Amino acid sequence: MIDHTQAQLSLGAYVLGALDAGDRSELEEHLAGCADCRRELVSFAGLPGLMGRLSLTEVQQQEPTPSAALQVSTLAAIRSEQDSFRRTVRRWRVVAGGGLAAAVAACVALILVLTSSGPAVVDAATVRRDLTAATGVSSRGSLSLLSKPWGTQVHLVLSDLPRTGAFSVRTIDDEGRQSTAATWQATQNGQAELTGATPSRIDDIDRVEIVTDTGITVLSNR
């Protein structure tokens, strides 16, 4: 089970989609019971957009000198990765020792489900919608909302966006409370696919809007 310190160190990687399935599941289980980590997760929503503003040349030109605090946090992250690796090894030992039959049974069950002739079952905790462009705007996009223990994951596939400026994903709940789920810089081809996060429960989200840095809404779910 992941502890609080490991969870905090993993939030940035979680937002960027860099955690493997096992670590992601452990982090989400921790987030379900930790309000502090849920609040901190929301603060990471703009991380993909901030990273997108850096060019490869800018990164290569920088020669940063790590601070003492950064060195300490880096060592802590390395220890966390080592602990994660040890947990993974232990899991494989369990499977190899006594859980292999259960794993085979699960695979057989999955094959039976996939090969059945019945209709496909859509996850009830996922909401998918096409986005509507504002008047005079040619942008297009689709939205997927996935219920999580800590709130809602927001996934967007967008095209024909303006080629300049910056954008943000704004969620508004049924009581009018707003939350920024993600931010990013305009792309040269006007396309973007990104995943953000909001603490709002999926059933409480009334609107999702794609907004420019000048406050203009270009796409929404209504």
Image (cartoon, grey):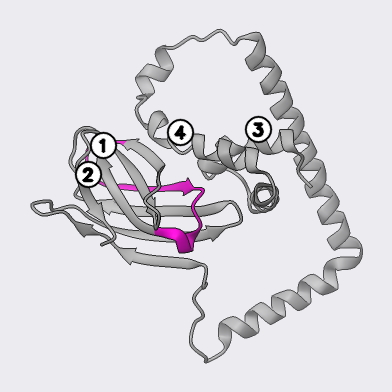
Label 1, label 2: how far apart the Cα atoms are: 7 Å
Which numbered disc, 4 or 2, marks the residue closer to the eye? 4
Mark 1 crowdedness (10 Å alpha carbons): few <14, some 14-19, many ≥20: many
Label 1 sits on residue: 186
Q: Is residue 188 magenta?
A: yes
Label 2 sits on residue: 190
Residue 150 in the image, given as x and y percentages of width and height? 59, 51
Q: Locate residue 69 relative to residue 13 in the image: left or right.
A: right
Q: Amino acid at mark 4?
A: Leu
Query: At 73% across and 33% down in the image, what residue appears?
Result: 5
Mark 4 crowdedness (10 Å alpha carbons): few <14, some 14-19, many ≥20: some
Label 3, label 4: how far apart the Cα atoms are: 14 Å
Q: Quadrant of residue 35?
A: top right
Q: Is residue 119 magenta?
A: no
Label 3 sits on residue: 9
Q: Amino acid at mark 1?
A: Ala
Disc 2 on helix, strand or loop?
A: loop
Marks 1/2 in contact by CB < 8 Å: the verdict is: yes
Marks 4/1 in contact by CB < 8 Å: the verdict is: no
Residue 71 drawn above or below residue 140: above
- What numbered label is drawn on residue 47? 4
Q: Quadrant of residue 73?
A: top right
Residue 57 in the image, given as x and y percentages of width and height? 35, 19
Q: Locate residue 142 relative to residue 144 in the image: left or right.
A: left
